[in-house]
Image (cartoon, rainbow, N blue to C red):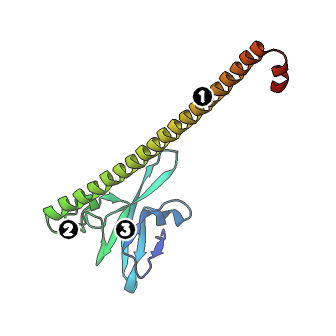
Amino acid sequence: MISVPRLILPLDAAVVTAAILKRLRGGLPDRVVLVGPGSAETEVHTATTKSGFGGIRGWFLCPKCSMRTSLLHVIGTLKCRRCAEIPYASRRSYGCRWWSLWGRAVHRLAKVREALRRRYLRLAQRDQLHRLEAELVEEVCRGLLTHLAQQEKSARRLEDVSQTGTSARIDLL
């Protein structure tokens, strides 16, 4: 007789994942016995599928509906999400459709706010860059004007020296 592997669940387990099947040595069995809190034993059938890189993925088959699932929820007995009537998080309406719409609106508002903040920072950095460029251009222009003014002064001195004679040339040197 083939022995069925027994997997002992923690006392506070709310969900059993198919990842625990990887712990089993010697390949995945056709069924396992899950021992839950209070020594309650549940026999669960397993299935395998090929994964993308040549590996094998293990699945539980729901004890109630035999649907292939990677999670079994511990609610009295082990059940899949459909049998336990647990909706996906995106489908939860918090008791009222308006609360769901409000939650989505608040989430969207937060995303828009963050986008506006990033854009403001980007524009502020761009404005700061434009100010720095303008200051640099102004400083370069000021430097060129002072340089041109000095060139003009020295040109005038040379004209004065050429008109007065050689004695003024000695003062320039």
Of the residues tagged 3 and 1, which is closer to the observer? 1
Q: Residue at x 63, y 26 (%)?
A: 149
Gap in angstroms between the C-alphas marked 1 and 2: 72 Å
| Residue 27 located left or right of residue 170 | left
| Residue 64 located left or right of residue 141 | left
Taking depth in this image into account, of 107 and 131 the one nearest to the observer is 131
Q: Where is residue 12 in the image (x, y as percent from the top left)?
A: 40, 80
Q: Which of marks 2 and 3 is nearer the N terminus?
A: 3
Q: Which residue is drawn at 38% across and 60% down?
A: 70
Q: Earlier in the sequence, mark 1 or mark 2?
A: 2
Q: Name the residue under label 2.
A: 94
Q: Which residue is drawn at 16% across and 69% down?
A: 95
Taking depth in this image into account, of 106 and 155 the one nearest to the observer is 155
Looking at the image, is 136 positioned above or below residue 22? above
Three-letter amino acid code at disc 1? Leu
> Considering the numbered disc 2 on the image, is that residue within a helix, a strand or a loop?
loop
Q: Name the residue under label 3.
A: 44
> Considering the numbered disc 1 on the image, is that residue within a helix, a strand or a loop?
helix
Q: Name the residue under label 1.
A: 145
Of the residues tagged 1 and 2, which is closer to the observer? 1
Q: Which of marks 3 and 1 is nearer the N terminus?
A: 3
Q: Where is residue 40 in the image (x, y as percent from the top left)?
A: 36, 82
Three-letter amino acid code at disc 2? Tyr
Q: Where is residue 71 in the image (x, y as percent from the top left)?
A: 36, 64
Taking depth in this image into account, of 82 and 144 the one nearest to the observer is 144
| Residue 171 located left or right of residue 130 | right
| Residue 29 located left or right of residue 143 | left
Of the residues tagged 2 and 3, which is closer to the observer? 2
Three-letter amino acid code at disc 3? Val
